[in-house]
Image (spheres, rainbow, N blue to C red):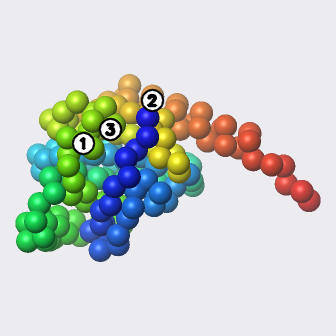
Amino acid sequence: MKFPTVTGSNLSGQRYHLPQDFEGQYNVAITVYQRVQQTNVDSWGALLQDLARQYPGLRYYELPTLPNYGWIRRSFIDGGMRGGIPDKAVRARTITLYLDVKKFNAALDLPTIDDIYVLVVDRQGEVLWQTNGDYTEQKADLLSQKLAELFSQTIETQPADAS
C-alpha cells in the first residue's frame, strides 16, 4: 500500500509534499482527526523518542488530518495548535493536512476517523506496518520488532566499506 501524495505545512510554516518529504529512511506517521485524540497520540511519544534515538534513520510525525477548510479556518486551527505546542521540535514534526479525508483514508485503508493510526512509511511511500489506537505494550513490541527488522535489512544491504 502506498501513502498518497499530499501537501501540508508543519506548525513552523515549512511546506511538505508527502511522502517524498518524509525525512527519515523510515518514518512513523500518526494520523489524528479530532482534538480529543491528542491524548492517544501523546501515549506513543516516549516510545517514539526512544526508537528515534535507537535508529538515527527514523523520523516520526504527527499528521492532524482535517477537511479542506478555507484559509481563515485553517489559520485559526493552525494558530491554536501552535499556541498549544510550545516545543519547537514538536511543532516541526506536526504537519497539518487539509484534504479530502475520506479519499485519504480510503487510499490507506483506514476505516474511520474515530481512531488514530500509526503507520511506518519508507522513503518511497510504501506503508510497511500499521496499527490504530492508544499505545499498548503489545503494539509497542510489534512496532519495535518491525523497525528492528527493517533497519537490520538496511544494514545487510548496504555495500561494504571500500577501505
Q: Which mark is residue 107?
A: 3
**Mark 2 or 3, closer to the camera:** 3
Residue 133 percent location from the top left of the image: 25, 33
Q: Which residue is mark 2?
A: 141
**Mark 1 or 2, closer to the camera:** 1
Label 2: state its secondary structure: helix
Placement of the N terminus among the 4 image quadrants = top left
Q: Identify the amino acid type marked 3.
A: Ala
Label 3: state its secondary structure: helix
C-beta proximity under 8 Å, tags 3 and 1? yes
Residue 37 percent location from the top left of the image: 16, 44
Q: Residue at x 22, y 65 (%)?
A: 85
Q: Identify the amino acid type marked 2.
A: Asp
Residue 157 percent location from the top left of the image: 74, 42
Classed neighbour count for the residue bearing mark 3: other residues with Cα under 10 Å, few (<14), some (14–19), many (≥20): few
Label 1: state its secondary structure: helix
Q: Residue furthest bottom?
A: 13
Q: Mark 3 or mark 2, which is nearer the start of the sequence?
A: 3
